[in-house]
Every structure is written in C-alpha cells, then in structure tokens.
Amino acid sequence: MAPDIGRRLRRGATSGAVVAAAVAALAASQAPEAIQPTTDNAGGDRAVGTGEGTPPSGEGSATGDSPYYTELPPLNTPPKQPGVPGTGTGPLVVTGPAEAGIPATVLSAYKRAEQSVRSTAPGCNLPWQLLAGIGKVESGQASGGRVDANGTTFRPILGPALNGVGFANISDTDDGAYDGDRVHDRAVGPMQFIPSTWATWGQDANGDGKKDPNNIYDAAQAAGLYLCANDRNLALKADLDRAILSYNRSTEYLNTVLSWFEYYKRGTHQVPDGTGVLPVDRSDNRRPSGLPGTTTPTPSVPVSPSPTSPAPKPGSQDPKPGTPGTTKPPTVPTEPTPVPKPPVTSPADKVAALAVAGNRQLTAITDSDFTGVPRAAALDASGKPVAKVNVRFEIVGATDTRFAGGKSAVTTTTTSSGIASSPALRAGEKAGTFTIRATVVGRTLGAAEFAVSVTERQADTLVRVGEDPLSAATGTAFAQELQVKATDKGALAPGVLVTAEIVASKTDPKPATEGPTFKDASRTATFTIGTNGTFILEKGGLLAGDKAGDYLLKLTAPGGGTLFVELKVTRSDSTPDPDPTPEPSEPGTPEASPSPSASPSPSSSPSPSATAPTASPSATASKA
C-alpha cells in the first residue's frame, strides 16, 4: 500500500513508508468495524459526522466562512405601533421599527421551513427566528426581499471567490452550475450555501422540481436541516452555538446572529417584498482594494451636502476682511490600511492523501449484509491523521448493492483518528463485481478504491426428503409432494436458487421434448430454497402429460448441488363403458373394450359421470 499512497502525496511529503505506517497504526487503533450511521432525510445524500463536531458541509462550514453583514440590531426595541398606512414618500409601511420588518415572502419561507423541519426532526426545536437571524446576516433577508412570486431572487446572490485570499480556499465543485465560477466556489443564495454543501443539503421546498439555492423556500429549509444535524437540540445553548458556528466558524459571526435572533424573538412584522431594510457594513469591508466582493447589490448612500465653513473657535482669529469663504474645510482623517487576515485553512486543505485503511476487498452473497465496510484514512503530508474531513463513498458499477437507506453514495466525516467509514452495506439480488470509490469532498486528490464482489447463494448438496415414488397416469397430475433440502458445507443453505428440468436420462442434459411438464406447460422451472433450507413442490405441481414412460426431474444449484428424482408415467387403462347395461362382458373379448372407431361422433364420448381427467388420455393410449 505504501507505493500507492506515496504517489498521492504532495511534493515535499514524507516517504510512502511513513504514510503506510500511519495508515496501519490508524487502522489498528479503530474499534472492529465501527460503522457510521447514514442520514435518511428526504432531499438527497446527507453528510454524517461522529461525535459533536462541525456538521459536514462543503469545506467544514455551510458558507465556506464567506463574509457576512456585521450590523447589529437596535439596543432598544420600541413598542409596536398599530398598523396605519404611511403617508410619506418612503417605500416602507411598517407597524414597528424598520429593522424588525421582514419581507413577506422571506418571512413565509422561514415559518414554512420551521414547520417542515419540526415535523421530521421535532427534537431539534428549530425556531424560525434563528433562520431569520442567519438570513439577515448572510444576505439582508434576500437583499430586502427582492424575490419573485415563487421566492427566487431576481438575480443570483453570490459571495466572493473562495480562493484562499482572506477566505477558505475551495476549488470549484459544481463546474460553475450554481455560482458561475469554474475555478473556485462561491457562496450562493439568500442563505449563502457553497455548492458542495448545497449538493448534500439542497431541498425543493416550493415543489417546482428544482433544488435552487437562490430560492428562499429551498434555501431556508436546507438551512434548517443543516442546523439540526448531529441530533442537535437548539433549545440548548450549547447546541445552538454549535449550530451557528457550523454555518460560519467565527465568534463574531456567532454573536451577530444571536443578537438578531434575540431581537426577532421580541417581535417582528411583515413588510412588502423588495422594501426590507438593507444592511451596509460587511465583515470584509476593510479588505484591501482589489479583492473580490459579493455581487449582492448594496443600497446607494445619499451624498452628504458640502460642509459649510465651521464657526470660529473661541480665541481664534477672524478671517481676513475681503476674503470670505477662504476658511479651509476640516481635514478628513485617512483610514489606515489594515493587515490582510491570513487565509483560512479547512481540514480538507490539509489532506495530502486518502488511503485505504481497511477492507480493500469486500465479498457477500446476494441479498445479505456485508460483514465489513470501506474505511479510508485522511493523512497530511507528514502522514498524520486529519480529522473533520468530509469523505464521499460512491458505488460505481452495475449493481443493486446499496448503503443503508438504499443510497448509492454517502458522505461521512473522519474521526479524530483520521478514519472515515461508510455506513452498512447490503448486497442486492444481482451477482457481480463493482467498485466503491472514496474521495475527499472539494478536493481533486486521488481516490481510495475498494473492490467489491457479490456471489450467488450456493449449495453443494441437494437431497430429497422422503422416498415416496413419484408416479402418475397419463393425462393426470402427480399426486405426491416433493420436498428437497439444500446444504452447503454441511450447513443449511436458505435462499439458493434451484433450477428444475424434466430430462429423459442422466446423461442427456437437454430437457425432454415429451412427457411430464410443470403447470405452465414448460419443462424448466426455478425454485428458491426457503429459510428452513428446503423447498416443496406441492401436489399437482407436475403434470404427467400424454406419453407413458420413465423420466427424471433434474435439480441443480450454484455450488454444485445436483439431484435426480425419478418420474414414472403409466398408461391410463380406465376407459368408460358406453353401454349402460350393467351386465359384465367376458374377459378377453373384443366387446369388453370398444374401439375408438365405434364412436361415430363426439356425442358418443363418456357421460359426465365418467372421470374427466382419464377419459381423453385413455383414448390417446389406445391409439398408441
């Protein structure tokens, strides 16, 4: 394994032997086959973490730690005023402080998201005011409610390119589908999801068939589910703080969101769409010029009138006569250029190699659970484990094998030991080979691959239970029951698929062309061994046909189990007497058994009181 890992390491990494040793140590330190749970909320493939760390997302936070609005709510909340239509020229009609107004569609989306999440995760106790607090800080409530009737913003709300300059360094994960950037990812929409996070948590809350991060209904519901990850109870302060920090890992961000959360809890009101108060100050406003910024439109700031000459200070000299207006305006102090913040490094950025940590080859029989799951180790350039890395496991190939919950792809998070394990894996009904591929979300590192095979259930022995001979007269059904037991290496073999064929001899593998058939008139059928290791061919399951003779029922199973059961078909000798006279005829005389030529027409066939199944076959037998 060392050479494989060595090829994956960045330039300057330690030798493959160091990494191999690290993987071996990590794998040995893990509990036997500790399987991470998967999520099964509607809406796609959800990331799963272990313990109470940051919930999985594109690069450790929902937004990639993009910039946010830093304005705080008023310190004092004035009492609400009764609703009176405004008479001024301003666009707002409010019944309270303007800062407490939330655009109608945006407010509806927050409340609908709360109801939806509470129905699926009641223990989370998600309040819509928390969504409103985040929406205020992330986008100013969708740019003041500039959304259409379906809740979609009139133009995309995009954050700056996450290129590592002052922000996380997140290479493109969506080929520009959401953010229009094929080089780096950007936070998108009113709740500012980065594309890799949206790929995991995106929702279609307005039922239009699309998961659109620029739709406030879709984004609000996705944000609610994201905040409730890891079984959080947002009624608890510790869980509430963790949830907010999972959105943006900044203490200042936490305090800003909490301030608006508490402010909205004290009272809000609805305002028309497009008239909400827009924030101005943003966390990256002090960045050096030339750095990319959000494309969210900001309100224009009215130009202040030119300053008038200030009144002279006491004791100062008066202006010289005849030179009015020559007083110099006050000097505006220049703002010092701040030092740029160091780039934020996400856990995924630290990974130099993703290696197989256990179960490189997995095998199971059809319709059963695998005994192990794929396990991958995230390592840095020195071979040390990297925690909190999002790893995606994907089933590649033609197979119906699935992870728990019926999913073909899942995302889990590395533990403190750097190990990510997929959820439980169950084989389907289709036998064959395929691959499970593990990759680091948001990175283009080489994948860790696992070879998987699913084989048919097998039985090396088939034996008949009971010795009653199977016989029937032509034109009738076999009245005996056939029970067969299947074993493999001495153990019962339930679920094995057994093939049954009617053949003429043990040496001729081809099905017979005459004689007995199954109920559907074919001479080939399949049966599945039951949970008790046997299957039963019920009475009447075989028809004798119209040709007397000795035949064989050949049973075969994957694994080599073979059984031949003799089938004997006798000629039927029960021919109905057309003469109603009870007088018996002498044995051996031709009159005792009338020839078929004696029947001038079909009307001379046996009366209804004769046994129906034997009438026709006896005529056939006499022709033979």
Image (cartoon, rainbow, N blue to C red):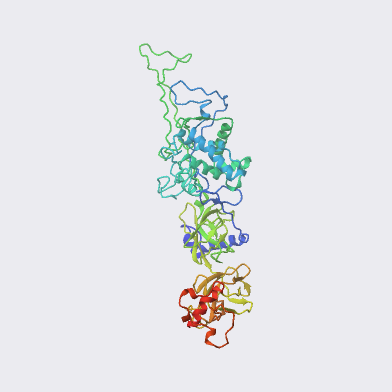
Task: Name the residue at the bottom extreme.
Answer: 588
* Above or below, comparing residue 216 to residue 412 in the picture: above
* Above or below, comparing residue 134 to residue 424 in the picture: above
Q: Nearer the viewer, residue 224 or 355?
A: 224
Q: Nearer the viewer, residue 412 or 382?
A: 412
- Identify the image quadrant of residue 318: top left
Q: Number of numbered discs present?
A: 0
Q: Nearer the viewer, residue 613 or 228?
A: 613
Q: Nearer the viewer, residue 102 or 482?
A: 482
Q: Position of residue 300 (x, y in %)?
A: 41, 29
Q: Position of residue 119 (x, y in %)?
A: 58, 43
Q: Position of residue 49 (x, y in %)?
A: 57, 51
- The answer to whether residue 185 of the structure is visible from this angle is yes
* Above or below, comparing residue 550 to residue 393 in the picture: below
Task: Name the residue at the top extreme.
Answer: 321
Q: Position of residue 156 (x, y in %)?
A: 42, 40
- The answer to whether residue 543 of the structure is visible from this angle is no
Residue drawn at x 62%, y 67% as measured from the top left: 531
